[in-house]
Structure formats: C-alpha cells, structure tokens
Image (tube, helix red, strand yellow):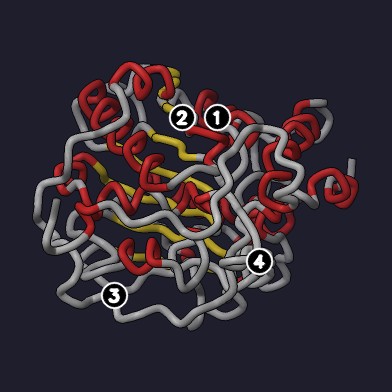
Amino acid sequence: MPRKLILPCVLLVVLALSATAYVAPADASGTRWAPLDRPGPALVVPHRVLRVALACHGDPSRGPEPVLLSPATGVTPGQNYSRNYETAFTAQHRAWCALTMPHRTLGDIQTAAEYLVFGIRRMHARAGRRIAVMGHSQGGMSMRWALRFWPDTRRMVDDVVGMAGSNHGTTALHQCVVGLTRCPPAVWQQGAGARFIQALNSRAETFAGISYTEVFTHTDEVVQPNSTDATSSSALHTGRGRISNVATQDVCPADVDEHLLVGTVDPVTYALVMDALTHRGPADPARIDGSVCQQVYQPYVDPTTVDTYLQPLQAIPGLLGVTAPDVNVVGAPEVPAEPRLRCYVFARGC
C-alpha cells in the first residue's frame, strides 16, 4: 500500500505536541536554576508503579547496546514502536525496554521523568553496562530532564537519540491559552516559552561522556521552528556532550517525511538511529549510504500487515485529548495553565 494512503488515518497523530502561544524564553543559564552536579531528589512515584510501567525484551547484558524507548505525547509505547523499532531491535537481538507513561504521556512531564530515571537505573543495573535512551517527539526530549536533574543517571547512558524531539518547545498550534482553555499538562510544558523548557535547557543542554543524536525534518509541522538547521527547535548546542544535529534533508534533500513519519517509518531517520547505536559517538550523516533515499519505509516496517495501520488508528483517542480538549476520552488531566516547576529545579532547592 502506498504511504500516501496512511496519511488520512494518522493526520490527528501529528498534532500530539500542540502548545501554548509563543513567548520568548528567558535566559536559561542564570543562577536561579539548580547546579548541574546537585544530587537528584527521591522519586515520588511508588516503586511498584514504576516497575510495572517498564516492559523489557531480551537480555541487556548481551548483544548490541540495549535501548530504552520513550513514547511521544498522546500515545503508548506500543502505538509508537511496536511496528517499527521494537520489531527491528528484536530481529537484531538487541535488548530493549519501553516505558508506559501515565495518561498516555499527556500528564506532567516532571512525573514522566521519574519513570525515565527508574528505567535508566533499572536497565543499566540489569545490563551491567551503559545503555541508549531513545524517543520520538516528547519522548525524544524528556530523557534530558532525567539527565539534567538526576546526575547519577549520566554515567549510565552512552547514547541519547531523539527523533523530532521537542528540545526547545514549539511555536506551532496555539489552542492552549492561559485563562481561556484547559489543556493536558504535557501540552502546556512543550510551548516554546514554557518554564519547563527553560529549566530543561538551563546551564547545559548536554553532558560529558554522552553522545547526542538529534534527527529532525524541515517539513515538521508540529515541532517548530525546524525549517532550517540554524533555527531548529530539536537541535542541541550547549554542554560537554558529543552532539550530532541532523535534518533528514541533510542526507536526502528531497525527503518530505514530516513529524509523525520521522519517528515511525522514515528510512533516513532509521539509518541515522542505527548509525548512532552501532558506532562510538553520535550519528555521522557522512556514513549513511545514499541508497536510503530510494527507500519508502524503514527496514522491518511491513506495509502489508494490518498492524502498520492499526496502531496509528488506536492512537487517535489519546490524541483527541490534545487536539480537542472537550473530547477527552482517555481520562487525561486538563489544567488551566502550565504546572508549577518542582522545587528541585531551582538553586534554592527544596
């Protein structure tokens, strides 16, 4: 089935990162933010809840570098990864774990970060070696909150791989307006001017010893601006980590895959992801074979199976809580403004 036939089924999915109106962010490097080396707080989410949320496949102590998968806003890990990366990693005998976040990742990202902290610690302990953390959209950004405010996790992570990550928020889709509408917490928090985004990028965006691969597309209609390399919201720049910011068009200039497809079926993104996971350091676009530009789907995505289309359709109910707050059918919370930042993000502490 041609890829164009998929799009009518998944147009609602690409709205999963709707955000508040743009407000220019304040200086994120100021002294109001927590120092980089202060130990992280105790996790508030009960251990039994965190344990159930982590689903794993394979032995992370053996084989290629194991990967922890973090889902995008409004979807479950199965809806995001079962038909693509989970299938690929299983075929490669690469151990992987996936986190199921509260409210289909529509809740407070500060809470979701605790799941990531737990997932990193647990998977690293089982592996006995450093792991990769990978995600799409919100999932391509949120692991950085864990690394920023729980410094012990940094020695456990070798690669951070983001696909269309909302690292600096988005200026697109302005239906959440303070005083006028109620939206899920994760939507407020991913606005370009959100306090959450300021805290996330405070003092340093990356950390020594970790390789960061950020893949984005110039045709992204959800995380904006991403139309140029210089203005990319997904790109990272500060800190001591090794960084590779790559637009799919840097490899294949004619590539038109947008926000959703970059994280699910895009062959260029897949090639960059695998390059990052199989080499020391971040992905290098110079190593990508030009034949990838002739591919329609990434490897292990089967356009003849029902699941390829069923999973995006099953994601729609969760995304309605974002695109149409009055039609919230999954019980996601809705709040009138961005949630307050937790005390541990500030220099004064708790």
* Residue at the image point whose x is 46% and y is 51% from the top: 140
The residue beneath circle 1 is 86
Q: Amino acid at mark 2?
A: Ala
* Residue at the image point whose x is 32% and y is 23% from the top: 60
Residue 223 lies left or right of residue 97; in this view the side is: right
The x and y percentages for residue 45 are 32, 29
How crowded is the residue under tag 4: few (<14 C-alpha within 10 Å), some, or many (20+)? Answer: many
Q: Say which element carries label 2.
A: strand
The residue beneath circle 2 is 98
Give the farthest residue toward the front: 179
**Tag 2 and tag 4, C-beta contact below 8 Å:** no
Q: Amino acid at mark 1?
A: Glu
Q: Amino acid at mark 3?
A: Ala
Residue 303 to residue 196: above or below: above
**Tag 3 and tag 1, C-beta contact below 8 Å:** no
Which of labels 2 and 1 is toward the front?
Answer: 2
The x and y percentages for residue 143 are 36, 48
